[in-house]
Amino acid sequence: METLHLALNAVTVIFIAATMFAAGLGATVSALRGVFTNIPLLLLALIANLVAVPLLGWGIGALFSLPSASFTALILVAASPGGPFGAKLAMVQSGDVVEGAAMQVLLASVGSITFAPTAGGLLTATGLGSNVSLDVGALVQTVALLQLVPFGIGLLIRRYAEPTARSWHPPAAAVSNITFLIVLAGMLLGNWKGVVALLGSLALLAGFLLSAIAFAVGTLLATGPPVRRTTMGGVTSVRNAGPALAAIGIAFSDQPAILGALAAVLLSGLAAALPIATFLSRRRKAPAAAETEVPTHGRR
């Protein structure tokens, strides 16, 4: 089991790096400038991810009267924005990958600073605990190493060697797709006992609703065309497991019940977000496919 855990961690690192590298290969400096100078978009994204979703997690947990382990896991997930799956969801839904990846990196960086006080405040308010203290510097370094650096390298290649970027993008995206499937399978295999143990509870439904409603909140609290808005929705719906896992280890001594609940919440959240992204992709590809069809009626 330890070997499987180490292998899954390695594949997860490859998935995150490949996804961000592929996003960087498809990005341009002008597009990024457009994202980071769009103050209304930035403010709304921060409100959605740092305020609305954490409160949503607290509200769903209270509404369902979740057990302490599940409630704790739900709050930790809700308080941690900028999950690397956000950039992947932008690809899956045929959305604005550049803006999605840029916003995801920004949220992960900001979230590494805001996570501890946000989670600590909500856990204190619910009486679940307050001793959530994390090494902010280590979290920021992790975000920089796994997300910002690969994205920046891809961006530099795109800027100074565009033909190379275009030729490297398909294989990078393929690696991202393959490792994505492996990570999903590994999460199920490595945490199936914890997930099965929660089948009779409301924890899975809570994680599903958190992700689905967060997708809607992120879409509504965004500016611009529908493609951008749903891309922001996808980024908002997927949370960052790293700080949550660190908090469980530091503040809760890696309690198996909380770890199992965390896996259940994350997996049920993906079960909500992935179908939404797939549906959006099909809707966007259908008109394009119709336009490429050659009309046959009216010919002689």
Image (cartoon, grey):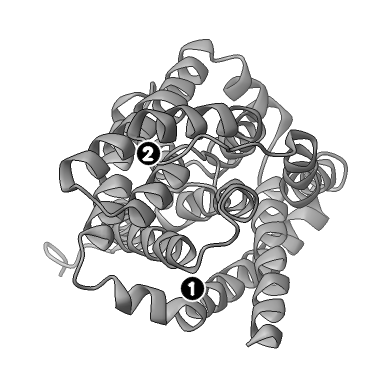
Report the residue at 31% width, 51% height from top: 284
Q: Amino acid at mark 1?
A: Leu
Nearer the observer, 94 or 257: 257
**Residue 124 screen position, x and y as percent:** 43, 31
Q: Quick check: 252 above or below 138?
A: below
**Residue 177 screen position, x and y as percent:** 56, 70
Tally the numbered discs.
2
Furthest-left residue in this view: 298
Left or right placement of residue 300 versus residue 14 in this view: left
Residue for badge 1: 184
Q: Quick check: 185 above or below 290?
A: below
Q: Amino acid at mark 2?
A: Gly
Left or right placement of residue 130 versus residue 151 in this view: left
**Secondary structure at numbered mark 2:** helix
Nearer the observer, 131 or 289: 131
Left or right placement of residue 254 versus residue 2 in this view: left
The answer to whether any part of residue 228 appears in the image is no
Residue for badge 2: 233
Report the residue at 72% width, 58% height from top: 17
**Residue 99 screen position, x and y as percent:** 55, 35
**Residue 169 screen position, x and y as percent:** 69, 60
**Which of the two discs, 2 and 1, sits closer to the camera?**
1
